[in-house]
Image (cartoon, rainbow, N blue to C red):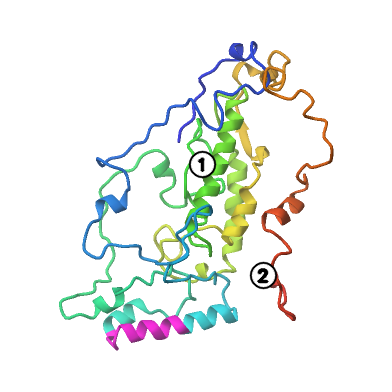
Amino acid sequence: MVLKSFASPKWRLDTPIHTERPRHISGFSLIVYEKNPEVSGTWYENRYPGCACDVNSHNYTWSFEPKTDWSGLILPVFFKGTDTNNAARNLMLKKMKEKLAGNKEPADGLISTTFALSCRRLTPGTGYLEVLVKPNVQVVFSGVTEVTEQGVNLQVVWTQDPESYLGLAAADFPPTIFSILGPNSPNWNGAPLLIGVKAQADYIVKMIDYWQTHNIPSFAPDAAAVRDFAAYRNQFMTKTVWADPSRSWYRSGSSKDKITAIWPASTLHYLETIRQVRFENWIFEYEGGNRFTYLEIGQSQTETNLDADLACCVREEDDDLPLARNRMIRIINKTGIVIVAEGTEAPPNV
C-alpha cells in the first residue's frame, strides 16, 4: 500500500482540528494489482487433485471468526533445549520414520539429527512422506542452479538480509510502502497466522488515520530504528531452535544466513509490541513546513457536529479505560479468568 498526500496546508486552515481526508477509512481509492482474472493467489493458481491446506491446524483462523474443527494443533516450541521441545522432537522423528517405511534414501535426506524441532517449519502434510517411498517417485535433494528473473528496488534491497520495521515497512522508501507479513513477521510463532495479519492491518489503519488527520505528505520508519530492531532480532535468535544449522525458509538461502522470515518471539509478544504506534520510530515530512497546521481554524470536531453532546467531557463516573499500558493489557488478555492449577510455575525467563 502506497500513501500519497492529496491535501495542502491551505485546505486545513478552513476546517476544524483533525478533519479527516477521510477517516477509518472511507472516501478513498483502493487499487488492487492482481495478475490473474480473479483474486485468491495460490488457491486460484493451484487446482491439482488433493490441493489443500498443508497444516490443518488452528494456525489458520481469524480472531473474530474462530474455526474450531481443525484436525491438528501446532504447539509453540521454539526455545531449544527444553523438555517440551526435546519430547516433541523425539515424537516427530518416530512418526517420520514410520511413514517413510524404513526407506533409507529419503530418511537420510529429510531427517536431521543436527538441529532442533521447529528450526525448520513444521509441515506435516497428510500423505506427503508416504508418497516419497512409492516406486514411481524419485526424491531429488540438489539445489536450484539458476534464477533468471531480475528484481528491482525493494526486492533488491531485501535480497540477502531483509530488514524492516517490525515486519511492516522499510526505511528509506517514502512515501511509505506498508507490507503484510514482511520480514520478521509472526507467521510461524505459536498462534493463528491470521491474528498476526489482522494486527498488522490494524496498525496500518492507525498510521493512515494519523496521516489523514495531520498535514503529512509522506513518512517512513527511522533507519536507526530498523537497524536497532535487526540487532535485537539477531541477538534473540541465538537462543531459539531456528538458529540451529539448517537451510530453512526462515533464512535468506543458506544455513548461515540471518533469520529474517519470522518474529523473534511468540505471536502474543508481537501483538503487544505493535498494539500502540511508537511515533518516535517514524520520520515525518510536514507539508508547508509547520507540523501544527492540523490545528486549523481553532474549532473541535465536537463543536462542528450538530448531533454531538457539547458536555461530553462531563460524566457521572470515571469510566475511562486505563491509560497505563500494563493495566490495559490485563483487560485485553482477560487476566483472572483462568484457573491456575496448584503448583504451576510461571515460565522461566530465557
Residue marked by disc 1: 170
Residue type at the position of mark 2: Val
Q: Up-down: is 23 above or below 44?
A: above
Asked whether the beta carbons under mark 2 and mark 1 sit within 8 Å of each other, the answer is no
Location of residue 112 in the rendering, given as x and y in whole percent from the top left corner: 40, 79
Residues 23 and 212: in front is 23
Residue type at the position of mark 1: Ala
Residue 49 shown in magenta = no
Residue marked by disc 2: 350
Location of residue 92 in the rendering, given as x and y in whole percent from the top left corner: 43, 80
| Residue 111, image quadrant | bottom left
Tell me if 293 is positioned left or right of 327 in this view. left
Q: Is the magenta stretch mostly helix, strand or loop?
A: helix
Q: Which residue is drawn at 19% across and 75% down?
A: 137
Characterize the local packing of mark 2: few (<14), some (14-19) or many (20 or more) Cα atoms within 10 angstroms: few
**Residues under labels 2 and 1: Cα distance?**
29 Å
First to last magenta residue range: 91-104
Q: In which quarter of the image is the N terminus?
A: top left
Of label 2 and label 1, which has the lower sequence position? 1
Residues 76 and 15: in front is 15
